[in-house]
Amino acid sequence: MEDKIICFLIDDDDDDQEIFSLALSNIDENIDCITANDGIDALTKLNKEELFTPNFIFLDLNMVRMNGRECLSAIRKIPRLDHIPVIIYSTSSEQNDITETKNLGAADYIVKPPSMALLEKRLEQVLRGYHT
């Protein structure tokens, strides 16, 4: 990966944001991670900043003000983002959550792994799968 890659993480947990950002920087220094604390903040940024078009959007399902499903549906209604992969990043490994979010337009689903090494491996798989 040579060009700058912008990943947009929407997650209301500060620790998860920090771990995710660190994992991305360990994978490749050319990856920038921009975060939003929930779906409402994310949609505000995406709708107000028309030039902001991340390469990947990672979205937590369980957030307080707007859950991941609602946010995913709203993101999929923004025309300039219709080609951007939205990857669910959640503690839930329920098959129903995986199926439902893929039906709503999610490109992939990552269950939050128990270690940094596993997170890096899974993120690398996702990033390389779309950016080869």
Image: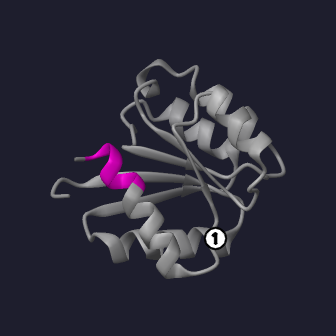
Q: Is residue 71 visible?
A: no
Compared with residue 85, is residue 109 higher up or lower down, i.e. above or below? below
- Say if the magenta span includes residue 127: yes
Image coordinates of residue 20 in percent, x first then y, are: 52, 69
Image coordinates of residue 131 in percent, x first then y, are: 27, 46
Image coordinates of residue 103 in percent, x first then y, are: 66, 27
Residue sitting at 58 percent across and 81 percent down? Answer: 115
Question: Which sits in the foreground, 109 or 28?
Answer: 109
- Say if the magenta span includes residue 59: no
Magenta residues span 126-131
Question: Which sits in the foreground, 92 or 80?
Answer: 92
Question: Which sits in the foreground, 37 or 111?
Answer: 111
Residue sitting at 66 percent across and 57 percent down? Answer: 11
- Location of the N terminus by quadrant is bottom left
Quick one: which residue is furthest to the left in this view?
A: 2
Residue sitting at 58 percent across and 36 percent down? Answer: 106
- Count the marks: 1
Q: Which residue is mark 1?
A: 16
**Residue type highlighted by circle 1:** Asp
How is the structure coloured here?
Answer: one colour
User: Could you say whether the residue bearing mark 1 is in a helix, strand or loop?
Assistant: helix
Compared with residue 125, is residue 132 higher up or lower down, i.e. above or below? above
Q: Is residue 90 visible?
A: yes
User: In terms of secondary structure, what is the magenta stretch mainly?
Assistant: helix
Residue sitting at 61 percent across and 36 percent down? Answer: 43
Image-based side of 62 in relation to 9, left or right = right
Question: Which sits in the foreground, 121 or 11?
Answer: 121
Image coordinates of residue 33 in percent, x first then y, are: 43, 61
